[in-house]
Amino acid sequence: MVKVDIKKDYIKPSKWSRPQRKLNSVKGLVIHWVANPMSSAQANRNFFNNRTGSYGSAHYVVGLRGEIIQALPDDEMGYHVGSSVYTSSALKKLGSYPNNASIGIEMTHEKWDGKPNKETYESTIALSAKILKEHNLDENDLWLHKTVVGWKNCSRWYVNNNNEWKKFKEDVGKLLKGEANLNPEVDTDDMILVEADAKGYYEVKNGDTLWSISQALDVDLPTIEKLNPSVNPKTLKVGQKIKVKGVNIGQHKVKKGDTLWGIANKYETTVDKLRQLNSGVEAKTLQVGATIVVPNGEESSSKPTKTNSHTHKYDKVGRVKGNVWIHSKPDFKTSTRTKIAHSGDRVEVCCDENGL
């Protein structure tokens, strides 16, 4: 079974969302949509936490990056399928009050059609398999909100696309039977480097927004907006250059025995950045007495970080495309696996080996 990373962030006790009633038993798992495009898992969890005047909550929320927040303990009842009427199949399998016999998962989505993106989908599949296995259930115990109550258009994507719902159940079933692999080996295509160039510019890629760029590079949005006063965030184009940070440029006079790696380490940068700043300079073209451009302008007094007998600086940031293993060494061996990085996670890259 795939390991699932879950952030437990239980909502406060409340008669509207967390009555703290113990479930009689878990007989089904219900899939919902949040009906709020582009909203985060945390925002939807907070909505449950602050809810008053009407009933509503779910046990889990799966975010757009595949992150999972648990809002209610598995053994407590949530208000996710309350209704004055229920389908005959729900009454037969879940009892007269399905809230008291089911766990609810809310899926986030990017558009009003409710279609989950790849990251949300894969995390929900893994989470569903985990919950079903823990309660001795299988994919036939999966429900849509609509198939429980008969009238609610939830989850919209699966209500309107029955074949997609069948595939969802099949994928959960495959994972339960060990026939699916949602955590493939690391591949060079599994990491997207999100970084500024040597002059502090980032090149816009398909799907980027100023907000997503700020999140990936850990630069607050107001700073990016200030650095780009003429940029309209609504009209970003692929390939457009966005200023994301200021870079101090200095010079280094090449001395006898200097190497590109040694100079990069001295100024806490990378060989790649030296090549960018100096039109592709290579080790064999270094000449004693020559002057090359370097970032930072002066030698750093901080001690470099040592990794695998080499000295590297965490100067690149990536976003994981698929659920992949993070390794303690760049050898990609099973023995060096440390944890799973999920789709959308921010990862610091410390070296350039094996194609990464």
Image: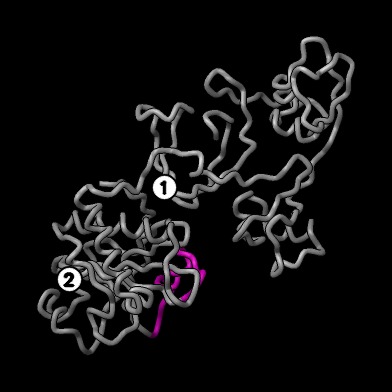
Q: Which residue is mark 2?
A: 101
Q: Is residue 61 above or below residue 309?
A: below
- Helix, strand or loop for disc 1: loop
Q: Depth check: 238 or 331 in front?
A: 238
Identified at 79% across, 34% down, the residue is: 295
Which three-letter amino acid code belongs to the residue tagged 1?
A: Asn
Image coordinates of residue 127 in percent, x first then y, are: 30, 56
Which three-letter amino acid code belongs to the residue tagged 2?
A: Ala
Q: Residue furthest bottom?
A: 84
Q: Residue furthest top?
A: 256
Q: Is residue 338 left or right of residue 163?
A: right
Quarter-of-image position of residue 297: top right
Task: Please state which of the two labelled residues, at mark 1 or mark 2, is closer to the viewer.
Answer: 1
- Helix, strand or loop for disc 2: helix
Q: Is residue 322 magenta?
A: no
Q: Is residue 72 above or below residue 158?
A: above
